């Protein structure tokens, strides 16, 4: 019994020290994978628990299977040091204002393919913390193009297509209805790899606006497609109504013209501006030739000569 108690007393300081050291600094030796879109800014996380001990230095480097990995950035004695030979010159900085307060994350601006490598974050404390990260730089998806295959008429089968020409795989396509009841047709079939949406035997309720979104590990883009309502009676009524209105307008104009002419005729007849009783009928408008050539009379000295037709 006494031997057991003595053993506990001897082991307790070691257990206590071990517990304190675990609380003081978290160690994350596992490798993590991160993705970034080409031309964007990316932050490589490197947090640590800073409750005990002072930080000697914080160092970022990348692996080239060298004995001494090339330096990216180093914080030591409150001073920053950079490797002027690295292609990241002028594009790296610590994400936190004071990396010694537990956040040694690194931000890389305008990432390119040359930045695609494995990074090492080392925080020199007791014990030392090391974190390994792999960055992959990818081309984001381009603006997709939405199209319709087939005639969007009631009872027909149609296919909505969506294609992003640029962008690295894996690319995932999703479709959503963004108008009306905002629910895809019950029998709609979505191909998330090819980007198609097939709808069989479409109905009036299937018309509206649809949105396709293409996503990758580094971004997403969307396009919209508006499908007019098929075989809607109101559309035919609108055409018929337009024709009816046009015919009505013509008839009204004609009726107004006739009424106006009649009123004018009646007014002029009443005021006596025209005496329609003196106007000969059409058959008498053209006089005979004998009426046009009246008798001509003239005198010559002592005799009178008469010429008549």
Image (cartoon, rainbow, N blue to C red):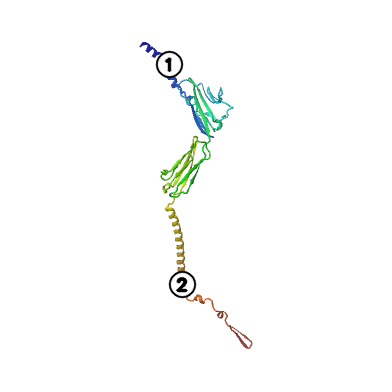
Which residue position holds label 2?
A: 269
Q: Circle 1: is it few (<14), some (14-19), or many (20+) Cα within 10 Å?
A: few
Single out the residue that lies furthest toward the bottom: 302
x and y percent of residue 35 in the render?
50, 32
x and y percent of residue 8 in the render?
39, 14
For residue 51, what is the image quadrant? top left
Single out the residue that lies furthest toward the top: 2
Nearer the observer, 61 or 165 = 165
Q: Is 41 placed above or below 270 here? A: above
Q: Quadrant of the C terminus?
A: bottom right
Q: Residue at x 44, y 21 (%)?
A: 22
SS assignment at label 2:
helix
Nearer the observer, 216 or 285 = 216
Kindly report the distance in space between the C-alpha atoms of the residues bearing marks 2 and 1: 132 Å
Nearer the observer, 308 or 143 = 143
Single out the residue that lies furthest toward the left: 1
Q: Is residue 72 visible in the rendered structure shown here?
A: no
x and y percent of residue 122 in the render?
51, 24
Which numbered disc flags the more N-terminal residue, 2 or 1? 1
SS assignment at label 1:
helix
Q: Residue at x 46, y 72 (%)?
A: 269
Q: Which mark is residue 291?
A: none
Q: Is 29 placed above or below 239 here? A: above
Residues tagged 2 and 1 counted as in contact (Cβ below 8 A)? no
Which residue position holds label 1?
A: 14
Q: Quadrant of the N terminus?
A: top left
| Number of numbered discs on residues | 2
Q: Circle 2: is it few (<14), some (14-19), or many (20+) Cα within 10 Å?
A: few
**Mark 2 or mark 1, whichever is nearer to me:** 1
């Amino acid at each position: 019994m006494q031997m057991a108690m003595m053993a506990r007393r001897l082991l307790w300081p070691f257990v206590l020290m071990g517990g304190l050291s675990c609380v003081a600094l978290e160690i994350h030796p596992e490798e993590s994978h991160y993705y970034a879109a080409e031309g964007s800014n990316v932050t490589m996380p490197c947090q640590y628990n800073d409750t005990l001990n002072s930080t000697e230095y914080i160092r970022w480097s990348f692996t080239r299977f060298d004995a001494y990995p090339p330096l990216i950035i180093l914080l030591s004695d409150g001073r920053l040091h950079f490797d002027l030979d690295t292609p990241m010159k002028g594009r790296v900085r610590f994400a936190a204002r004071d990396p010694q307060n537990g956040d040694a994350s690194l931000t890389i601006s305008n990432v390119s393919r040359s930045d695609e490598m494995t990074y090492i974050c080392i925080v020199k404390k007791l014990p030392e913390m090391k974190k390994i990260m792999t960055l992959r730089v990818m081309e984001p998806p381009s603006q997709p193009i939405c199209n319709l295959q087939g005639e969007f008429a009631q009872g027909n089968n149609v296919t909505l297509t969506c294609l992003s020409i640029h962008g690295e795989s894996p690319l995932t396509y999703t479709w959503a209805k963004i108008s009306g009841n905002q629910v895809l047709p019950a029998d709609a079939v979505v191909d998330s790899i090819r980007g198609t949406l097939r709808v069989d035997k479409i109905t009036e309720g299937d018309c509206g606006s649809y949105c396709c979104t293409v996503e990758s590990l580094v971004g997403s883009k969307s396009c919209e497609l508006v499908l007019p309502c098929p075989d809607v009676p109101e559309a035919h009524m609108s055409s018929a109504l337009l024709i009816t209105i046009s015919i009505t307008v013509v008839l009204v104009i004609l009726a107004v013209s006739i009424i106006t002419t009649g009123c004018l005729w009646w007014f002029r007849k009443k005021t006596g501006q025209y005496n329609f009783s003196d106007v000969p009928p059409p058959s008498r408008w053209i006089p005979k030739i004998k009426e046009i050539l009246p008798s001509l009379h003239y005198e010559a000295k002592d005799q009178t000569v008469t010429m008549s037709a």
